[in-house]
Amino acid sequence: MPRRAIRLAVIPGDGIGQEVVAQGLKVLSAVLPQDVKLETREYDLGARRWHATGETLPEAELESLKDHDAILLGAIGDPSVPSGVLERGLLLKLRFAFDHYVNLRPSKLFPNTPTPLAGRPEIDFVVVREGTEGPYTGNGGSLRTGTPAEVATEVSVNTAYGVERVVRDAYERANARPRKKLTLVHKNNVLVYAGHLWKNIFDRVGQEYPDVTTDYLHVDAATIFFVTQPERFDVIVTDNLFGDIVTDLAAAVTGGIGLAASGNINPTGAFPSMFEPVHGSAPDIAGTGKADPTATVLSVALLLRHLGYEAEAARVETAVTEDLAARDGVTRTTDGIGDALADQVRSLP
Ligand code: NAI
Ligand code: MG
């Protein structure tokens, strides 16, 4: 009889979200030890739901999502939904309601995967992006809207509490990695108030981590190094907006968004953390079987690690590494890649 259980909420979402999540679940089931029972509950949320009922995330569903160990999300969105409706009404609402203050985005250049960078540098870093503050809190508004004299504000919110907890998390992650290096990315020469808050807290907390080497880069300079010297990065900590932008760049230099995984994490465990591929619903290829489920499978690895299944997480990552190394240019379907990865995790020791 199973002794342990993972209660997983699943939000497949729209377009290829449905297709890639099915593969993620396939690999998750294959890698879990016999005695771990996987209980899933599916939520119909996203563009389809919004078109059908006008709802984005009803309170009752938000409440019932809380009753899970983690959430696996595919992708939400469709060009037919006005911009911002699902982002604010669903994705950001979840992040704020569940206090996902760590947005974790590993960036690794796997063997045999294409990179636009010459010379194939070693790329293996992780971005810890703040997830609940910055300019994403909805603190703003507009005046004289729609007139030639329109005024708009979008205030960046930075609290000592919010910065310290994410900076601490980043130090912990850096301290646990072999290189033990943490880079703060901000723009404190121009954004002096927020920038100094970040830098002061970064320096103060750093005193508790004598083994971690620290660095600071302005965000514009950081974008140069992502391309010219990505090997200089180990763990990066940054605010919500800078993190949003640099992680897409990071994905681009490490083989594209078909491989980029992410976690919206509440490290305290007070609410379930949510794991998702970085890419969207890709309406241009939805239903064709061309979607690469690898980013979702790597998100499942993050999920497993977050829940304490370290050996299983490592097995999923090894399976992905071996699968990528063996890819020979022959096109496989979404399902075909999912099957191969599931077989692979089963056969690994
Ligand atoms: P997208 O990431 O869906 O697609 C961009 C391009 O990458 C497309 O050409 C697509 O075919 C390709 N692509 C994406 N994922 C792929 C995969 N797994 N395998 C192979 N190719 C892949 O971004 P786009 O087109 O800007 O947005 C489409 C919809 O997705 C929009 O409604 C957008 O709002 C939503 N979106 C949702 C996100 C989320 O749920 N977190 C994140 C990004 C976009
Ligand atoms: Mg983004």
Image: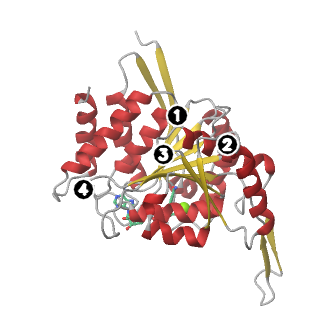
- The mark nearer the N terminus, 2 or 4, is 4
- The mark nearer the N terminus, 4 or 3, is 4
Residue on which disc 4 sits: 112
Residue on which disc 3 sits: 179
| Dot in front, 2 or 4 | 2
Q: For the residue labelled by badge 1, is the local secondary structure a helix, a strand or a loop?
A: helix
Which numbered dot is residue 168?
Answer: 2
| Dot in front, 1 or 2 | 2
- The mark nearer the N terminus, 3 or 1, is 3
Image x and y of residue 327, in percent: 20, 52
Pointer 2 residue Cβ closer than 8 Å to ligand 2: no
Q: For the residue labelled by badge 3, is the local secondary structure a helix, a strand or a loop?
A: loop
Q: CA distance from mark 2 to mark 4?
A: 35 Å
- Residue pictured at 49% horizontal, 63% vertical: 248
- Residue pictured at 35% horizontal, 55% vertical: 109
Image x and y of residue 303, in percent: 48, 37
Front residue of 290 and 214:
214
The relative height of residue 341 versus residue 286 in the rendered view (above or below) is above
Query: Residue furthest toward the bottom?
Result: 148
